[in-house]
Every structure is written in C-alpha cells, then in structure tokens.
Image (cartoon, rainbow, N blue to C red):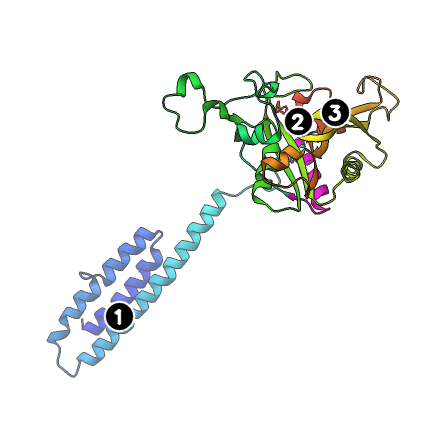
Amino acid sequence: MSLIEQLTALGADGLASIAAADSAAALDAARVDLLGKKGRLTGILRGLGALPADERPAVGAAANRVRTAIEDALTTRKAALDAAALDAQLAAGTLDITLPGRARPIGAQHLISRIRDEIVEVFCGIGYTVAEGPEVELDFYNFTALNHEPQHPARSASDTFYVVDRSTDAETWTGPEPSDVLMRTHTSPVQIRTMEHTKPPIYILAPGKVYRRDVPDPTHLPQFTQMEGLVVDRDVTFADLRGTLDYLCREIFGSQVRTRFRPHFFPFTEPSAEVDVSCNVCGGTGCRTCKGTGWIEILGCGMVDPNVFAAVGLDPEEWSGFAFGLGIDRIAALRYDLPDIRMLVEGDMRFLRQF
C-alpha cells in the first residue's frame, strides 16, 4: 500500500475514532494516537525519506490535508462535548422558580438615630453646623471651663465615671492627673473646644453619647444620647434663644405645641431656664403622662455665662450667645408616648419594628 493510500485510510479511520469519542479523555486519547510524536501520522511520514524526490510533494500535500481534517474534527468534537457537559451541569442544578422566595427582612434606622437626624436637619436648615468631640474628656473641658465649682456634686465619683483609678494606676500613669480623665457627662465640652479654635460667629450643634452614674429606670440611663447647641455672635439676646427653641419644638412635636420657659440654674448659663412643652397625650389638659400639669419638661437652656467666655479667651463685652441641651432618648419617648425609656436600648425587635 502506497503512502498516499495509507494516509487516506488514516484520515477515514481517524475521523471515525474522533466521532466515537464520548468524553474529553477519550477525545484526547484519539488526538495522541493520531497526531502525537509517536502517533500514526508521524509513523507514516517517517517513510517519506525513502520516496523518490518527484513523489514527495504529492505525499506531503496529502499528509497536510489529513492533518488539517483531523485537527478540525478534534476542535468540532471538543466544542460539542463541552456544550453537552454544560447542559448536563445546568440540568442537574436547575432551580424550581415556582417556589416562593426567601424574603430578607428590611432594616430601619433606630428611633434614637432618627430623632437625632431630624433635629440636625432642622438646625442645619437655619445655618447651624455639626461639631464633634471625644467621649473620654478632661476635667477642664467637662467642668472647669463650664464654670463648675470645685465642690460641685457632678464632679463626685458617685455621679461621674472617671477613667483612671488613682489607687491602682498612679505609678504607671503618665497623662493628666487620674481624677482629671472622665467619660463626658454632657456634650458641652464640644462647645468649649469649638470656641477655643473657632472665631465667632459660631452656630453649632453637638450630638453624641454621654455617660452618668445613673441607675437605669423608666426615665434615666447611664448612657444616653444628647444634643446641645451653641450660638456665639454679637447682640444675641434671650429673645433669639426663645424664638429658636419655639421653632425647634414646633418642628419636632407639631405646630399645635405650646412652650413654657421656667427660671432655673445651670453653672454655664445666666440667666438659665428649663423649657416645657404642652403634653402631647392630653393636649395640655392634664393626664398621667404630664402628672396632671399639662406640661412636660424637655430641655435646659440659657445665655452663655461670661465666665465661660473668659475660659476660652472671648471678650464677654464683645460677644454674647446662648446654649441649650436636650436628651434625644427623652424626646423620642415623649414624641411616641413610651412609658419606659429603657425600651429604646433593650433591643426587643417586637418594639423596634413598630417604628
């Protein structure tokens, strides 16, 4: 049998074996048998050197035709096997789209965060900016610069969380005096820090967590969220303070709410006042929520004391201002008529999902 006849037979046999391959492994074995270094085509071509020179071109051309046909057949069969494997994989993993889906619960902003953001939005709409400060504070910023006397009850360890224990850490402590480092009891230190580094006019809000040694009960928490405001400018009056807080109360509790200012005392403001709003449960007629008075206290406020200005290097003869502070948790409890402020932080989803 001539080499051309052998090549023709090899081509026919090779195409048949490729078509019969039913897996990738079988197809690769057919490729090695036909085209490998020790394959059948290579064996036939080894006899090319014994042919007369005038017969070699015809045999070479026939060999190229056979090689091309086998390579094309290998490519086509590989694509067919790959497609069949993919179809089988998809069939095995098919999902029944008629089954009901697993719905993920949609989260919502916590009630405290929602009230905080509402108040921030109210004040940012009239030109205020938000200021922040550390929760671990120094006595100077938390008490001294705010005109607290050295014997003020709030400076007692029974009222305030001090961070460094003098009895155990005195030898290794290298910072301020141990009794000077504490968890802030209000966000007023943010006001002091702002006045230290910002030239008036100043219109800021200071929201954040504060800490006090309070036993948890329906109206108190040892950690709660506070919002304080500070205005420093020329010719600021108590009328400006009252108008600002009236506006806040209407935005938070509704246009029907009434406000009442009562004289009070705070070390850092003079004159000072506590602000009440008409009870949102009874409308001011008297009920259990307002203890029959028709009013509910919501915040404290006053004109900035000249001693506070002096502590931060501002001339009280040139500048005046007012400050106010309110508890976000308390506002949330009043707005939604909650009987116990602890409900806000207990993490009971049955309660939280209502809002």
Q: Quadrant of residue 289?
A: top right
Q: Which residues are magenta?
A: 112-129
Question: Judging from the image, what secondary structure is the residue with disc 2 in?
Answer: loop
Residue depicted at x 59% and y 35%: 311
The amino acid on which the numbered mark 3 sits, given as a three-letter code, is His
Mark number displayed over residue 267: 2
Disc 3 + disc 2, Cβ < 8 Å:
no
Q: CA distance from mark 2 to mark 1?
A: 109 Å
Is 14 positioned to the left or the right of 300 in the image? left
Q: Which of disc 1 and disc 3 is earlier in sequence? A: 1
Q: Does the stretch in magenta take in 221?
A: no
Mark number displayed over residue 342: none
User: Crowdedness of circle 3 by 10 Å Cα count: few (<14), some, many (20+)?
Assistant: some
Question: Judging from the image, what secondary structure is the residue with disc 1 in?
Answer: helix
The residue nearer to you, when weighing 143 against 333, is 143
Residue 126 in sight in this render: yes
The residue most toward the front is 317
Q: Residue 106: x, y in percent?
A: 64, 36
The amino acid on which the numbered mark 2 sits, given as a three-letter code, is Pro
Question: Judging from the image, what secondary structure is the residue with disc 3 in?
Answer: strand
Numbered disc in front, either 2 or 1: 2
**Residue labelled with disc 3:** 264
**Residue labelled with disc 1:** 8
The residue nearer to you, when weighing 178 against 48, is 178
The residue most toward the right is 285
The amino acid on which the numbered mark 1 sits, given as a three-letter code, is Thr
The residue nearer to you, when weighing 291 against 111, is 291
